[in-house]
Image: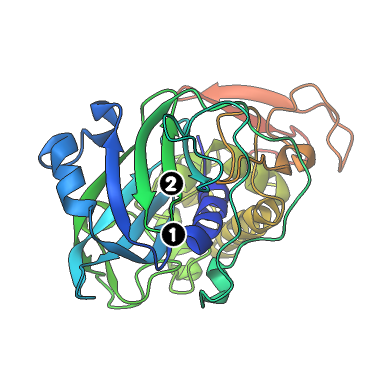
Amino acid sequence: MPELPEVEVVRRGLGPHAVGRTIIGVEIRDPRSARRQAGGASGLEQMLVGTTVTAIARRGKFLWWRLADPDGADTGHALMTHLGMSGQLRVRSRAAVPAHDAASPGAAAPDAAPPDVDLPADLRAPAPSEGPASDPVRHLRIRLALDDGSHVDFIDQRLFGGLWTSPLVTADDGRTSAWGSPDDLLPRDAAHIARDVFDDAADLPAIARAIRRRRAPVKSLLLAQDLVSGIGNIYADEALWAARAHHATPGQALSQVRAHRILRACRAVMERALAVGGTSFDALYVNVDGRSGYFARSLEAYGREGEPCSRCGTALRRQVRSGRSCFFCPRCQRRR
């Protein structure tokens, strides 16, 4: 499923097209993608039509849209977006969206944001990258029509993701709630999610101490969204390889220095992934313009069973723990 870098790529790509735009229509093609919404599909439409997107924020793998009413006041709710296993947000320009179906094969790439839209640096469109366009859209679930004639399509093949609104609450620590957030408010449905390693308010030494208080394997702790959010199977394996740590090492067996080193490795690995658009193994994850990420070409451990470790040449191994594959170097990542 998309992890922190992939969701952040989507957030940055979506911002120039959505921030400052008014949602003028909501088309629910599959009510299952609005199942978390109070009042179901009709409730989602009532909550969104006529609102203006003022910001797009992210904590871990959760993305949300801040909304203002026609008078410019905050609605007190945010539009939650979770991509699940295969969710995509795709922007379709007016020219690229046939009136009968925005999901037509061969749709063109979206237009650039209007030059007069003043956006913060972290919401400006990333530099274009080379790479294959995604497959034609076949699993459109929800379409949001914007006032400039464009659409944002939520596409989800496996139906684990969804869109819904959630009331805003204040972050426990009173600090800016998330990457891209204008204040300390965040959706109630994301309040239980810990800060991620990209968050300026994340206290990495404190997270390291929390990891050391638990007996579970360190990889399981990196995946525990109540400790640190946004890390999934791919980046956990990559960070543990970079930090030379075995995935089954109990948190209590780590020193503070070593636990902190692992968290810094998580951040460094995901920063590199973000720079190349994330990791795409298939057409299930793409950016809002339909392009894939290329970090799969730089993976050191994940998915490389039997291949030589780039550090020592030892064949990488794969173990399954708690139903998850763990890829590691048996020489560089000895269990202590």
**Measuring 64% from the left and 54% from the top, which residue is drawn there?**
274
Tell me the amino acid under the disc marked 2. His
Residue with the mark numbered 2: 151
Q: Are marks 2 and 1 in contact (CB under 8 Å)?
A: no
Please tell me whether residue 180 is drawn above or below residue 87 in the rendered image.
Answer: below
Identify the image quadrant of residue 171.
bottom left
Q: Is residue 161 visible?
A: no
**Nearest the eye: 104 or 283:** 104
In the rendered image, residue 254, in percent from the top left (x then y), is placed at 54, 53
Mark 1 residue type: Ala
Dot 2 falls on a residue whose secondary structure is strand
The quadrant in which the C terminus is found is: top right
Q: Which color mode does the image show?
A: rainbow
Q: Position of residue 82 (x, y in %)?
A: 37, 43
Q: Residue at x 51, y 78 (%)?
A: 118
Q: Nearer the viewer, residue 2 or 226?
A: 2
State the count of labels: 2
Q: Is residue 287 left or right of residue 185?
A: right
User: Badge 2 local density, few (<14 within 10 Å), some, or many (20+)?
Assistant: many
Expressed as whole percent of the image width and height from the top left, the position of residue 12 reads: 54, 59
On screen, residue 332 above or below 67: above
| Label 1: which secondary element | helix
| 277 left or right, relative to 170 | right
Residue pictured at 21% horizontal, 33% vertical: 35
Q: Earlier in the sequence, mark 2 or mark 1?
A: 1
Q: Residue 238, located in which quarter of the rendered image?
A: top right
Q: Is residue 150 visible?
A: yes
61 or 24: which is nearer to us?
A: 24
Residue occupied by mark 1: 18
